[in-house]
Image (tube, coloured by chain):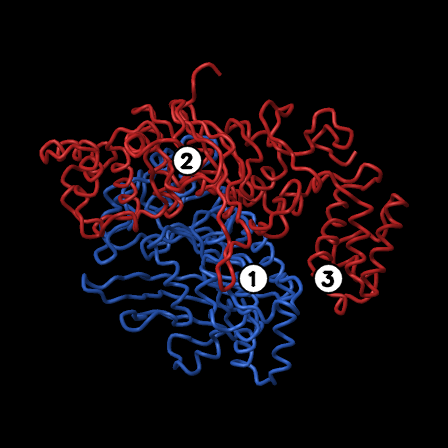
Amino acid sequence: MSNPLLSVRDLHTTFDTDDGTVRAVDGVSFDVDAGETVCLVGESGSGKTVACESITKLIPTPPGEIAAGEVRFDGEDLTSLPDKQLTEYRGGRIGHVFQNPQGALDPVYTVGDQLVEAIRLHRDVPKSAARERAHSLLDRVGIGDVEDRIDDYPHQFSGGMKQRVVVAMALACDPDLLIADEPTTALDVTIQAQVLRLLDELQDERGMAMLFVTHDLGVVAEIADRVVVMYAGKVMETGDVYQVFENPSHPYTKALLECLPGRGRALETIGGTLPDPTDPPDGCRFHPRCPHAVPACEDGDQPAFEDVGGSHQASCVLYGADYDEPELAEANDD
Amino acid sequence: MTDDPLLAVRDLKKHYPVRSGLLRRVTGQVKAVDGISFEVREGETVGLVGESGCGKSTTATSVLRLEEPTAGDVYFEGDDITAYDDDEQKRFRRRAQMVFQDPNSAFDPRMTVGESVAEPLAIHGLRDDDRQAEIVSDILERVGLSADDADRYPHEFSGGQKQRIALARALILNPDLLVADEPVSALDVSVQAEILSLLDDLQSELGLSMLLISHDLGVVREVCDRVGVMYLGEMVEVAPTEELFANPQHPYTEALLASIPEPDPRSRGEAVELTGDVPDPSNPPSGCSFHTRCPRVVPPEDFEFPDGSFRQVLDFRLAAENGDVDTDALAGDTALREEFGLPSSLPDPDAESVLAAAISDAASGDVEAAADRLADAFPTVCERTDPELVDTEAGHPAACHLHDAASEHAPPELTNPQD
């Protein structure tokens, strides 16, 4: 069995705040295979972004800290690497695309200069060669008439075009893994469709893996191979995209799918709010809001993962061996 | 229609001057809203949708006269609000309220929630503290919070709760019209669902009329009775919500609907993709402003273009006009055809000879000549004339040349416009 490209094991990322320690990511494990697209889904505050940023230690320390766990990228444990070596991964073998393209570009440099800088940071090439590469990257991500636009400043580009520039920059050093954190959330739906198409094509061309963070289940259905559903710092369910959408198993995943607006039927709301991150509930993190909660949900740790078919797993007592069958059947009917 | 609608907007325009140079002379106009008309009847929820920059929010603020419209009229119960004096305006503001997108910036952080919510009461003359407190507790409970929350500060609430408070403040004067500008865009999907159901409940309880602005067609479908689709400051289609979703009549509406990612992995990749960005509103395209991106642009009547190939020809021409054809990188006819997705030859020999000549113009470096040649030979009605919002066979109006009545150039069947 070959090793996954990225393997996150039991990752704990905490932040010290005045109100106590926030366990933003609290024992998260997932893998990304080479060439695969994995989506991290969840509401804001579920820890998806922190999980992503922990991979290359982009979280501000202090107050943040990777308290425990392992991030193996191509066999190397990134959590134990010194900053200097990490820099080779950041923007080198691991590219990042952030949510807000405006914030990701420096307003006082032209996009060409910024791309050249990104390339030369990781590759020992002359400026002219780097500029040529910047040119071809911009051309590839669909910036028309690159010759005219390479010396433009970020404010001269529209939101969608800026995100294309950011994608070009993330691709500058041919990464093996692209981490995209809500890359289309700030864009209009028509432009979102264009950027998703572009990412898909680029991934096919380059065989790179993608870790994609989003709260939009529509986007997940569009691009994911596998899905990791997070809630309050924990993984609730993982599985391939068809399993998760066609047979959502964790009550949280079901609830998320139910509350999508505009599907021509009555909206189901989840009710309640995310738990206090400094003092999460015992047992399953979702039990205070869960319509199927039973007393067993309220004690101990997050339930262990149970197989619900193939590689599809859910962290819910409903699927535990010692759970009563009839109620399980009823819960599934909902 | 027999009765006056609660709100009637007629040919509303809002243009912003563009100033430049040392003397800040007006050098152009951004036509944010350019002649739109619609109505909101009593108890009805009307949605306005479109991409960013299409003028939805400007419409909302102009309708409430938070900004002075450049032209056009807004009638509230038959009275023209643009002619109101200060007193009348204050009375109108009491009856028409607004909720904004970002609940985090909608409150003064130093005022308690109770003070913020009660402020409109004081402004409109109710200054008795006990009465105020009573009304505030009542309205807070109505939006799903508790009366005790009045003494807390905005930062103690989550985004969804703050949006409930914003609703409470908007509803405390018992308005007839609520204008909600992207009320759920800043919220998580689970919280969105809560606020949308709350809006729905409140509306039926209070008999409110609502104008809802959103870029999210899912949200609009959830709460609106009718929907207007806007593009570059113009209304391109108006229809009852379910009709719009089932039977869109404007190609832009179709494209917008098709770009929503479906939460179903089996329907992947079926989206129709719109090319390009929204054009610059200070210099909108002539004719139908959507013709630069429209997948169903009407081909010239003298030639035959197979399925959609006129779109590529037009894309090539537009790129040539904007100087976006890089003749150094794309040497030769074949490379040019490939870049713009043009077929190796068009089936209509007359059309092909024009296209071939234009391509060899471009290949030899004279991009302008190529653009001129194509513009002369292939005029399209979409570029020449601005389509009117007219009733379509589907029973609701759309502004598209595909629906020109008994037109000689427009094929009547939308489903197969190339025949």
Residue under mark 3: which chain is it in?
A: B
Looking at the rendered structure, the secondary structure element under dot 3 is loop
How crowded pointer 1 is (Cα within 10 Å; few <14, some 14-19, many 20+) is rated as many
Residue A156: quarter of image? bottom right
State which tag comes first along the sequence, 2 or 3.
2
Q: Nearer the viewer, mark 2 or mark 3?
A: 2
The structure residue drawn at horizontal position 35% and vertical position 46%, both measured from the top left corner, is A321
Which residue corresponds to mark 3?
Answer: B325
Mark 2 = which residue?
A: B63
Farthest-out residue, left: B130
Q: Which residue is mark 1?
A: A164
Q: Which quadrant holds the C terminus of chain A? A: top left
The chain carrying label 1 is: A
Amino acid at the residue labelled 2:
Val
Question: Is disc 1 on the same chain as disc 3?
Answer: no
Disc 1 versus disc 2: nearer the observer: 2
